[in-house]
Amino acid sequence: MSNMSNAVVVGTQWGDEGKAKVIDYLADRSDLVIRFQGGANAGHTVIANRRKFIFHLVPSGIMYPDKVCIVGNGVAFDAEQFLKEVDELDACGISVAERLFVSDAAHLVLPYHKSLDTASESFMGKEKIGTTGRGIGPAYSDKIFRVGIRVGDLVDADRLTEKIKNGFERHRALAASIYKADFPLSLDEIIHRYAAVRQRMLPFIDDTAFRIFEAYSKGKRLLFEGAQGTFLDIDHGTYPFVTSANTVAGCAFTGSGIGPAAIDHVIGIVKTYTTRVGNGPFPTELDNATGEMLRKEGGEFGATTGRPRRCGWFDTVMVRRAVQLNGLTHLVLTKLDVLNKLEEIPICTHYEIRGKRLERFPSNAALVSEAIPVYETMPGWKSDIAQCRSYGELPLQARTYIERIREICYNIPVLIVSVGPERRQTIEVTPLT
Ligand code: GDP
Ligand code: IMO
Ligand code: MG
């Protein structure tokens, strides 16, 4: 894989597919790594040089000392969380100075957005979405309602105070009148905290769209880091059990400010089983001992909230839809090692809904909740593959499983197979051209 060119990496399921591990791996042959949507709801785990980091906002390419990392305009930006990550990196001797930039057009997530997120969830009771509580819905609502505060607003201290005051009052009124909830933080506390945040943020604020364009024009290689997954997309996911942003590859352009022609590859990260955090339909879910086993073997606990992830079998109906929605050019299969002990591995090939066979993922989430998964069964390999470093070293059954997935998913080439959480536990299958 000598020629990386420019690629978008996205999740093809409900998030936590192992995107960050793959971004970290691919970043080695990129120049810029760019987050373009979502916020600190993302939990991106990178294990490299015997260190483990969980990034929520800092792009997963930051572990390499020479990579430029960018938080694009499409991100819902929690500045306090961002600075915490910068401090953690600093404590480990990883300097981000002059190589980490945040778009002045990204919208800020303020503490009152998080309070409103929590208030809205408790108000909804059983109907709640199961959000991460990171203020994502309220912050994107402000953006779309055109009352948000942007990173660029941090530059002018007086205007910032005025805007925070207006935002706080509006959200407090909303919380009190609709959700009957109080805010834990006072306006003074927020203003005080943001005076310090503002100072520290100044060196990071940038016209990132221009920086990206300039790098692109000079032939630098761009790697776009998606967050969440295709089925959490506000338009294409299992609405209303989704996040508040687009998550599909198309969003890389609007969320960073570059045109579609800049992209050569669209890489879909596919976990070789399925997980979901939060509520909403999940056809192949295993609410039993087998699901428990996948959770244990795969360490399936949320990187952001610590919640146990719901687990189920691999669902090709979903992944085929993800190929369509993102225009995937490559698949990356992750966590294959989690299936090591299985005698047999079921793959969902289609659904039955109201007695009818359906090979297409329904665009209506209500129908998805009625779907009965139909499986074909593949033989397991029953051996440890974590040490395999080439495709040929994988047991025949593992290769057959991979080939079958590829065949069902429109024959999209498999770029990489991941057999463990560490950078070196990565097998390159197809070269990128
Ligand atoms: P992301 O949100 O898509 O970046 O994924 P998360 O970091 O939330 O969750 C993926 C988890 O699986 C993390 O704990 C990773 O360290 C781990 N992981 C990634 N790839 C593999 C793999 O191939 N095998 C195993 N066993 N773990 C993996
Ligand atoms: P990464 O990037 C998994 C889920 C939440 C909830 C829904 C809405 O690590 O893959 P939100 O806080 O966004 O309003 O919550 O979306 N969710 C994720 N699930 N991985 C993520 O990110 C997620 N980001 C949001 O659990 O169901
Ligand atoms: Mg995650």
Image (tube, rainbow, N blue to C red):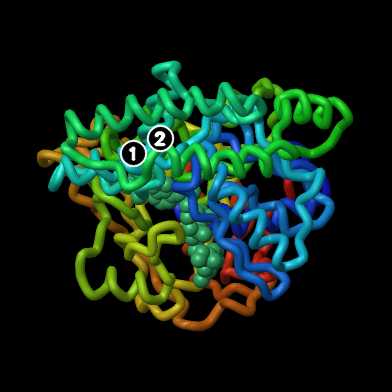
Pointer 1 local density, CA inside 10 Å: few below 14, some 14–19, many at least 20: many
Toward the left, the furthest residue is: 354
Pointer 2 local density, CA inside 10 Å: few below 14, some 14–19, many at least 20: many
Q: Work out whether residue 137 can be spotted.
A: yes
At horizontal 36% and vertical 68% (from top left) the residue drawn is 345
Image position of 207 (left or right of 198): right
In the foreground, 324 or 293: 293
Q: In which quarter of the image is residue 9?
A: top right
Give the CA distance from mark 1 to mark 2: 6 Å
Q: Is mark 1 within 8 Å of ligand 2?
A: yes
Residue 303: x, y in percent? 46, 61
Toward the bottom, the furthest residue is: 383
Q: Kindly identify which numbered label has been placed on residue 321.
A: none
Q: Kindly identify which numbered label has been placed on residue 233.
A: 2
Q: At numbered mark 1, what does the secondary structure look like: helix, strand or loop?
A: loop
Residue 266: x, y in percent? 61, 38
Image position of 24 (left or right of 319): right
Q: Does the residue labelled 2 lie within 8 Å of ligand 2?
A: no
**Is 57 rendered above or below residue 423?**
above
Residue 12: x, y in percent? 46, 45
Q: Quadrant of residue 204?
A: top right
| Disc 1 target residue | 242
Toward the top, the furthest residue is: 146
